[in-house]
Amino acid sequence: MASEKINMPQLGESVTEGTISSWLVQVGDKVNKYDPIAEVLTDKVNAEVPSSFTGTIKELVAEEGQTIAVGELMCYIDTEDGEGDTQPTNKETDEAPKETTEQPNQDQSMKKRYSPAVLRLAQENDIDLDQVTGSGQKGRITRKDIENYLSNGKPKTTSSNQEVSSKPSQAQSETVVEKATSSASVSDVQQGDIEIPVTGVRKAIAQNMVRSKQEIPHAWMTVEVDVTDLVTYRSKIKDEFKQKEGFSLTFFAFFVKAVAQALKEYPQLNSMWAGDKIIQKKAINLSIAVAKDQELFVPVIKNADEKSIKGIAKDISELAGKARKGKLTGDDMKGGTFTVNNTGSFGSISSMGVINHPQAAILQVESIVKRPVIVDNMFAARDMVNLSLSLDHRVLDGLVCGHFLSYLKKALENMNENTMSIY
Amino acid sequence: MPVMSYIQAVTTALKEEMQRDEKVFVLGEDVGKKGGVFRATDGLYDEFGEARVLDTPLAESAIAGVGIGAAMYGMRPVAEMQFADFIMPAVNQIISEAAKMRYRSNNDWNVPMTIRAPYGGGVHGALYHSQSIEAVFANQPGLKIVMPSTPYDVKGLLKAAIRDNDPVLFLEHKRAYRLLKGEVPEDDYVLPIGKADVKREGSDITVITYGLCVHFALQAAEKLAEEGIDAHILDLRTVYPLDKESIIEAAQKTGKVLLVTEDNKEGSIIGEVAAIVAENCLFDLDAPIKRLAGPDVPSMPYAPTMEKFFMMNPDKVEKAMRELAEF
């Protein structure tokens, strides 16, 4: 048994609604297909509405004297042939294609195709179009992108999409870069030397690094953390995790989680310098550095404090995958508030990171190394890791950073099978 | 302010003009005692009598020809073609006589006639009851073609057409007759022929269209607004001669232009609109000018599925608008 709807039929040209003058059936009546069920009055005709199904009238929705539009529900009828069973499946198939269309388009092939309007605006306002992020199809820069760029004065760079606090400082740092690059081009090129033009992502990296080093007074701190328990715990579950979830459970995910927790405790580090003020960010969005050939990307794990270790591991795996395929979008790299850099993956045990402008700090997670350590006055073989923090001394001081690092140290040393869950 | 349907606005305008000026009379097939097959002239016969509400033979060339003669003699006829599809036998009268009379006679004679005709599909009317015929007449200087989209515009523009001293083709979308309702002031107002009207202000894309499609575009725009796409909608209202100034202004506003008609695509009104935009707005354009129109197929099919394929609807307009916004 299935319940079917009978809707107001189209009763002639230009007729868009009809008034039910009387029902010819009552609830519980049995009707055959094409039996008249109601009399309907329209501007042009009086007509009987036939039933579209054989069955029992279940509910009369429209009342006598009521005017309803063509296609609107008149009544429900219970049918016995199961005609209605097809409806739910129809709905599912309707929804399926929607999901596929929602996938973001990451093709950037239209990035350098400019419309007449965009070219004119760029020329009139002296805009370097390489500095504008396109929101159009396949990365195309739209007229609206330029208009927003002009009205906000907040250019978005290709590599990290970070907001610059004011226009003058942008201009200033650009001239610095030009100086830096021009001084390099003066140096003599000998036979056999290879000249590599600085373009695209490399150029953007260069600009950002110069700006960071030029503007931000860096200071550094390092702590040593005993992660033996964490190593044991991860070794125990990693194979099963990979099998079950389809991606790797890396150490890095644990570190990112611990950093997110520590930032929640010490939000001072989750902030940025904005000239006359310091902006403490509410969202904890962690930038992670992902290298690919000559390029360095800084995609963002959004709201890391709200995610489980599994969730973070999944984000890392997806973002790294996208970076390798060159499919990262502007959105993937937008909104970072603090950077965690996995230098340990190269075997590094100590480094001094350059802060990801305009953030206030960056944490280098170095390589985990088994070393002899004295525990309870005895030598023990422990898994040790160095965490190196670079901080913007305008925003942060040693005290709060020291607290932050010791919190982080304690959190990581406490991570074991009994104290935590990866889900 | 009373709310009335599109067709009630037609009737109201006719009635008020006939009360105001006794030179105004209507003629056409079944317009008298029956009040018209769509009921557009309902009640006029009773109020004004058979001398001013004329039932004619089934001969459209005669309806137009009688109208032209009466108009030249000083009357203000409102001729009804029962369906726009039936206007073809009258084309010679309209194009060669009515449209050219003032020019041919060096201003000695003019033809203050209005020809009303219901056009358009989506009413299961198939071939002879669904056509859009505006393009046939849209390169005839001397003739004006008005295609209103709301009851308010219908009343103001039909009055303007009747008072115009030259022939006006007044095309009413038959599906809009009872579908569209809106507020219509009771007072005697006239809207200018030859002026387009902004029906919605927006900044992302510009949709230029006319007739029932204005309604589709407005519906689509409301949906798209929820996605953050802000559409600017210009209603041409008069499709010949076109309001070039308003078209240029609307196109320049966003640089992304979608043109919509339910007529067959090739040779339609919107092709001319596209040319105006292309000639004047190159450096403001941010996307190719897009046309959304009926297929180049001889006529509206009768099968409901095929009619749906042929006919314009809000979903088709919404899809095209979204594509342009995303470009």
Image (cartoon, rainbow, N blue to C red):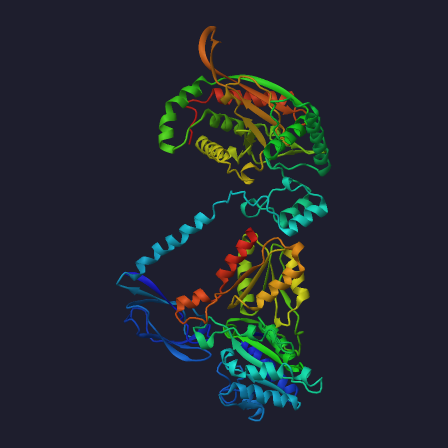
Vertical position of residue A54 compared to residue A254: above or below: below
- Tell how many labels: 0
- Please say if B91 is above or below A368: below
Residue occupying the point 36% across, 56% down: A90
The residue sitting at the left extreme is A81
Q: Quadrant of the N terminus of chain B?
A: bottom right
Left or right: residue A288 versus residue B100 is: left
Measured from the top left, where is residue A409 in percent x and y?
Answer: 52, 20
Q: Residue at x 48, y 19 (%)?
A: A413
Farthest front residue?
A191
Establish if A113 lies above or below B317.
Answer: above
Residue A45 location (% of width, % of height): 42, 80
Q: Where in the figure is residue A273, as x and y percent of width and height?
A: 67, 31
Q: Is residue A122 visible?
A: yes
Of A90 and A204, the residue lying toward us: A204
Res. A180 image quadrant = top right
Camera-side residue of B192 and A120: A120
The residue lying toward the viewer, choosing from A39 and A112, is A112
**Of B169 and B93, which appears nearest the observer?**
B93
The answer to which image quadrant residue B246 occupies is bottom right
* Residue A72 % position (x, y): 42, 67
Horizontal side of residue A241 vs B320, given as left or right: left
Q: Residue at x 44, y 75 (%)?
A: B127
Residue A65 visible here: no
